[in-house]
């Protein structure tokens, strides 16, 4: 475990080109809060929290599958997570890194922690869909959500390594991004484990755990994470997984999304991945009550209604074809852009 001295800032750390001591970072934090742009205020709030006397920082979970909640992450766990990231991705002192994620959430906060602990040269830009338009520089490391990578496709050539999180990378986007001369990784993460505990290069199937992390599955087939350097307790997830071994796993989907239709278990995320090759809109599939089947699978599509051709279903198995297609003007989302299935379905109810 990495030893963390409270208030430590790596001597090589730079923020927007400036070498800043903890005291100067507090001053920057106050400036961000009082006079900064909307995206800078959460950065200021976090910096003040980071340098206070508490040994934890309060975080809000994303609320993807339920109501968001406040949890406490210990600062030394956050430091250990930063060190594991540095080791896994080989990004040490003097790494030129881009911060383009909202600092209200753990991913944005952790970019700041990594920079301060590992000695990065960090530039902060607004967390917009095309963040690289806000800077002409080249970078060695950046963390983005899939939408940012998609909108920044050509500009990504200016980044050596990119990690993607906050949502599944679609097969079509994955194939496209793999044509770039950039090292791009998809991550598996949650707030409770201080962001990512595993990653995989685009194009690969199995995730590899970060240093100090091992995994098993429970009786449901859901992932159980043992990561003592970032969590005091074992983390039991609702993510179905197929294990290769204690350090490699394939993510199958959410346990709470599984549809039991006429005794056949259907895995929405896998079906959605197949459909994404043919339907160029955001979609999800879900189960609705059915007197005969127990649950019937329906396809929900975002946007104006249109006629689906039968070719859209050519990649599906016979049980995976939806019984009904529904359209909704816009999906309900979390603050980080993840689709809220249950909230979206409520909008369809009469």
Image (cartoon, rainbow, N blue to C red):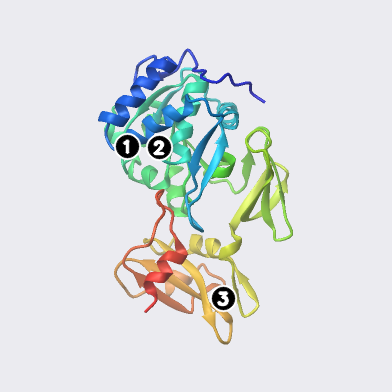
Residue 306 horizontal side relative to residue 321, left or right = left
Return the mark for residue 103: 2
Q: Residues within 10 Å of mark 2 (few under 14, many from 20)?
A: many
Q: Quadrant of the N terminus?
A: top right
Task: Work out whether residue 188 can be spotted.
Answer: no
Q: Badges 1 and 3: C-beta atoms under 8 Å apart?
A: no
Between the residue at mark 1 and the residue at mark 2, the CA separation in whole angstroms equals: 7 Å
Q: Earlier in the sequence, mark 1 or mark 3?
A: 1
Where is residue 13? Give x, y as percent.
44, 17
Residue pointed to by mark 3: 318
Q: Which residue is painted at 46% across and 47% down in the image? A: 166
As displayed, is residue 292 above or below residue 160?
below
Q: Is there a contact, CB below 8 Å, between mark 3 and mark 2? A: no
Q: Quadrant of residue 240?
A: bottom right
Q: Are marks 1 and 2 in contact (CB under 8 Å)?
A: yes
Query: Residue, x 52% and y 18% (percent of image)?
Result: 8
Q: Which residue is mark 1?
A: 39
Instruction: Give the residue displayed 69% in from the left and 58% down from the top.
Output: 221
**Looking at the picture, how far across and down is residue 249, in whole percent?**
66, 48
């Amino acid at each position: 475990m990495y030893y963390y001295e409270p208030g430590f800032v790596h001597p090589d750390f730079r923020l927007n080109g400036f070498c800043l001591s903890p005291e100067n970072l507090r001053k920057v934090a106050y400036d961000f809060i009082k006079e900064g742009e909307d995206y800078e205020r959460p950065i200021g709030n976090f910096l003040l929290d980071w340098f206070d006397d508490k040994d934890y920082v309060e975080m809000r979970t994303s609320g993807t599958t339920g109501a968001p909640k406040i949890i406490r992450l210990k600062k030394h766990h956050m430091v250990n997570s930063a060190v594991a990231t540095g080791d896994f991705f080989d990004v040490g002192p003097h790494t030129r890194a881009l911060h383009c994620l909202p600092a209200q959430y753990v991913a944005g906060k952790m970019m700041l922690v990594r920079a301060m602990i590992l000695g990065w040269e960090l530039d902060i830009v607004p967390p917009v869909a095309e963040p690289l338009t806000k800077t002409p520089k080249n970078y060695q490391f950046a963390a983005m959500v899939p939408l940012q990578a998609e909108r920044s496709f050509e500009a990504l050539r200016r980044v050596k390594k990119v990690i993607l999180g906050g949502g599944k990378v679609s097969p079509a986007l994955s194939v496209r991004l793999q044509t770039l001369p950039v090292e791009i990784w998809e991550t598996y993460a949650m707030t409770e484990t201080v962001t990512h505990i595993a990653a995989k290069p685009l194009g690969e199937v199995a995730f590899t755990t970060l240093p100090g992390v091992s995994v098993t599955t429970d009786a449901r087939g859901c992932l159980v994470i043992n990561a003592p350097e970032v969590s005091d307790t074992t983390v039991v997830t609702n993510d179905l997984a197929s294990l290769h071994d204690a350090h490699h796993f394939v993510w199958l989907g959410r346990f709470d999304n599984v549809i039991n239709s006429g005794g056949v278990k259907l895995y929405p995320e896998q079906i959605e991945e197949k459909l994404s090759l043919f339907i160029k809109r955001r979609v999800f599939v879900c189960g609705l009550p059915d007197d005969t089947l127990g649950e019937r699978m329906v396809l929900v599509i975002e946007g104006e209604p249109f006629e689906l051709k039968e070719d859209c279903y050519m990649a599906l198995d016979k049980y995976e074809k939806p019984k009904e297609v529904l359209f909704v003007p816009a999906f309900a989302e979390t603050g980080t852009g993840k689709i809220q299935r249950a909230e979206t379905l409520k909008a369809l109810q009469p």
